[in-house]
Image (tube, rainbow, N blue to C red):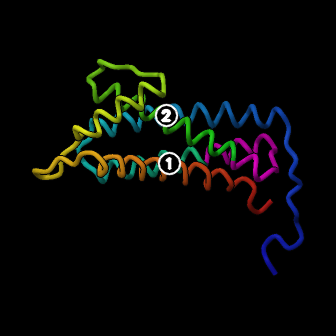
């Protein structure tokens, strides 16, 4: 017999629960995004950056999970959606902070289209070096896509911890 043989999730939620998750998860995601973005721009040690990436994404997922439990959200699809929203906030705020730090505080871009254009230009030029090589173009975009994937995966899957074992 499975762990949830006798319990079926009710699917219930309330407006206060959604607001709780959006506020708590959003604030955590934005804060961690700015911390990660700045650290990623200034820290030359890739292993530390990877730990920060995984840590920030995991903490955002856990923040959403905890807020969903506090807000008594019992709807798994809604919790997944809220985890997705928090992951997008983490990704967006990390890019805002990274661009601001990388440009030596010359740019503070808030418009997603401006962020996209900036990243296209910087990706073609290359933004970091490994030994004597500066990856450009598709390699940089691939790394950034993998980074976004980690953020979204951990934000979404971590958020569902609140509905397990209820």
Q: Residues within 10 Å of mark 2 (few under 14, many from 20)?
A: many
Which residue is found at the position 34% from the left and 19% from the top? 107
Query: Residue 39's image quarter?
Result: top left
Mark 1 and mark 2: span between their CA atoms? 11 Å
Viewer-proximal residue among 119 and 22: 119
Which residue is found at the position 30% from the left and 54% from the top? 47
Numbered circle sitting on residue 160: none
Viewer-proximal residue among 47 and 87: 87
Q: In which quadrant is the N terminus drawn? A: bottom right
Viewer-proximal residue among 76 and 165: 76
Residue designated by label 1? 151
Which secondary structure, mark 2? helix
Q: Is residue 104 above or below residue 95?
A: above
Residue designated by label 2? 92
Measured as percent of width and height from the top left, residue 25 is found at: 63, 37
Which residue is found at the position 73% from the left and 44% from the top? 68
Q: Is residue 48 above or below residue 97?
A: below
Q: Is residue 66 above or below residue 96?
A: below
Q: Is residue 155 left or right of residue 53?
A: right
Q: Is residue 74 left or right of residue 107?
A: right
Measured as percent of width and height from the top left, residue 116 is found at: 41, 32
Query: Residue 23's image quarter?
Result: top right
Q: Is residue 88 left or right of residue 40?
A: right
Q: Residues within 10 Å of mark 1 (few under 14, many from 20)?
A: many
Measured as percent of width and height from the top left, residue 101 is found at: 31, 27
- Which residue is most to the left? 132
Measured as percent of width and height from the top left, residue 13 is found at: 85, 43
Q: In which quadrant is the C terminus drawn? A: bottom right
């Amino acid at each position: 017999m499975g762990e949830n043989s006798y319990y079926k999730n009710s699917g219930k939620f309330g407006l206060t629960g959604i607001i709780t998750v959006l506020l708590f998860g959003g604030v955590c995601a934005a804060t961690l995004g700015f911390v990660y973005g700045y650290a990623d721009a200034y820290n030359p040690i890739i292993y530390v950056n990877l730990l920060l990436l995984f840590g920030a994404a995991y903490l955002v997922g856990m923040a959403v999970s905890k807020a969903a439990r506090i807000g008594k959200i019992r709807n798994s699809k809604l919790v997944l959606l809220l985890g997705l929203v928090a992951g997008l906030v983490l990704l967006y705020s990390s890019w805002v902070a990274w661009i601001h730090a990388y440009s030596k505080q010359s740019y503070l871009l808030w418009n997603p289209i401006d962020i996209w254009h900036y990243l296209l230009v910087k990706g073609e030029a290359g933004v970091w070096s490994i030994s004597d090589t500066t990856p450009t173009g598709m390699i940089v975009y691939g790394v950034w896509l993998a980074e976004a994937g980690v953020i979204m995966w951990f934000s979404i899957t971590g958020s569902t911890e609140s509905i397990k074992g209820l």
